[in-house]
Image: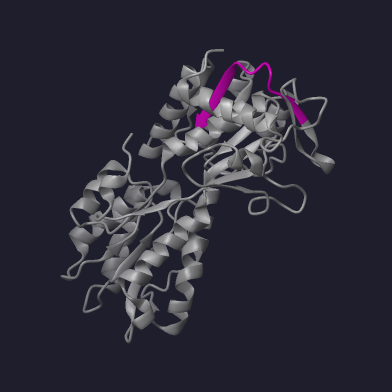
Amino acid sequence: MKLNKFLSKILIYSLAFCLCGCGLNSANSSTQNTGTAETYSQDYSVTYSGENIKKIGICMPAMELERWVNDGNLLKQNFEKAGYEVEISYGDNLIDTQINDINKMIDDGVDLLIIAPVDSDSLGTCMERANENNIPVIAYDRLIFDAPYLLAYVSYDNYMVGALQAEYIIDALDLDNATGSYNIEIFAGDPADNNALYFYNGAMDALTPYIESGALTIPSGQSDYYSCSISSWSTSLAKTRMDILLSSYYSKNTQLDAVLVSNDSLALGVTSAIETSYNKDNSVIITGQDCDTANIENITNGLQSMSIYKNLQNEVWVTCYIVEAFINGYSPSNNLCEGSQFDFQVTFDTTSYGTNEYSINSYLLTPQVVTKDNIDSITNY
């Protein structure tokens, strides 16, 4: 199989570290040269073979969000350049559509699945079927629940995303030195998306001490996760909720100082509502995530304060690296990070996303805060 320049490089790194005895871990001595990797132990032991992987199925949740189109294109391009056949689908943010797509890929004979779920809690039956057909699965960006046989989970550190958004607000309002109180509203993401809760928890863990001290006030009183969640990360639903909040709680002399917004599609709706329905002169702090094109323009024009940048190419590279390592007989481990020679940080984590019954081999990348001051440093796709 002809590998492209990137995959050739990571394969060379993998083999070099293996031969030195200090890098990638073979599953066991009898399987090192056969492309077999034992991923889990105890009741969830499973051995997949990577030596005959030729066709890869990629399932993204929707085309409505810019980032999923970029992810899908990058994954498809990298694997096709490496000589793999690729089947790709987008689930239209519909659970049944994605389930049908996955089942079709299994019927079509894919050898490995890379899935970013529409709903993290809805694919258990599909995962069982993939396991019965000896098809390894990588959860991409969003975790898949009820899937003890996952080969790996690749994502950014989602808790850190929320913490960085909150820290931006804390610094921008100088809350550690505040003598009065600032008003804030909270916009969480799609409750069907496992990542959304991590974003929310990361942010609220940082903001709660300031809410409890009175440095921050939520005039609407809406601060629990489900009260703040926006289904399907919908821009229009975010705008509608922001319009309602503004008319209900900010129609007189109450000033809105900040809106914690989990991602850029929601930020577009919040920004639109503030532009049309907010009658004060102050600049409202608005956070975001993904650095979508329209939001980069809003940051440049001072309409959005910041976004969280997650280099999708890096996330794709880690995914490709895990696949190549697996094909060559190595199981997920911290040594994949240590031996990769990546010029960005990747953390191997087996505790944050597992259960009492099994662990999840997670590879977590580090996100970056983007503002008007450093916006030229990010990569466009």
The answer to which quarter of the image holds residue 288 is: bottom left
The residue stretch that appears in magenta: 47-60
Is residue 187 something one can see in this rendering?
Answer: no
Does the magenta stretch mainly form a helix, a strand or a loop?
A: strand
Q: Quadrant of the N terminus?
A: top right
Residue 337, image x and y in percent? Answer: 59, 41
Residue at the (28%, 42%) spot, across then down = 293
Drawn side of residue 309 relative to residue 209, left or right? left
Residue 29, image x and y in percent? Answer: 81, 28
Residue at the (63%, 38%) spot, across then down = 152
Compared with residue 287, is residue 105 higher up or lower down, i.e. above or below?
A: above
| Residue 329 magenta-highlighted | no
Residue 334, image x and y in percent? Answer: 65, 44
Instruction: Give the farthest residue toward the top.
Output: 1
Residue at the (51%, 20%) spot, across then down = 87
Instruction: Give the farthest residue toward the front.
Output: 20
Q: Quadrant of the C terminus?
A: top left
Drawn side of residue 45 relative to residue 303, left or right? right
Compared with residue 224, is residue 254 higher up or lower down, i.e. above or below?
A: below
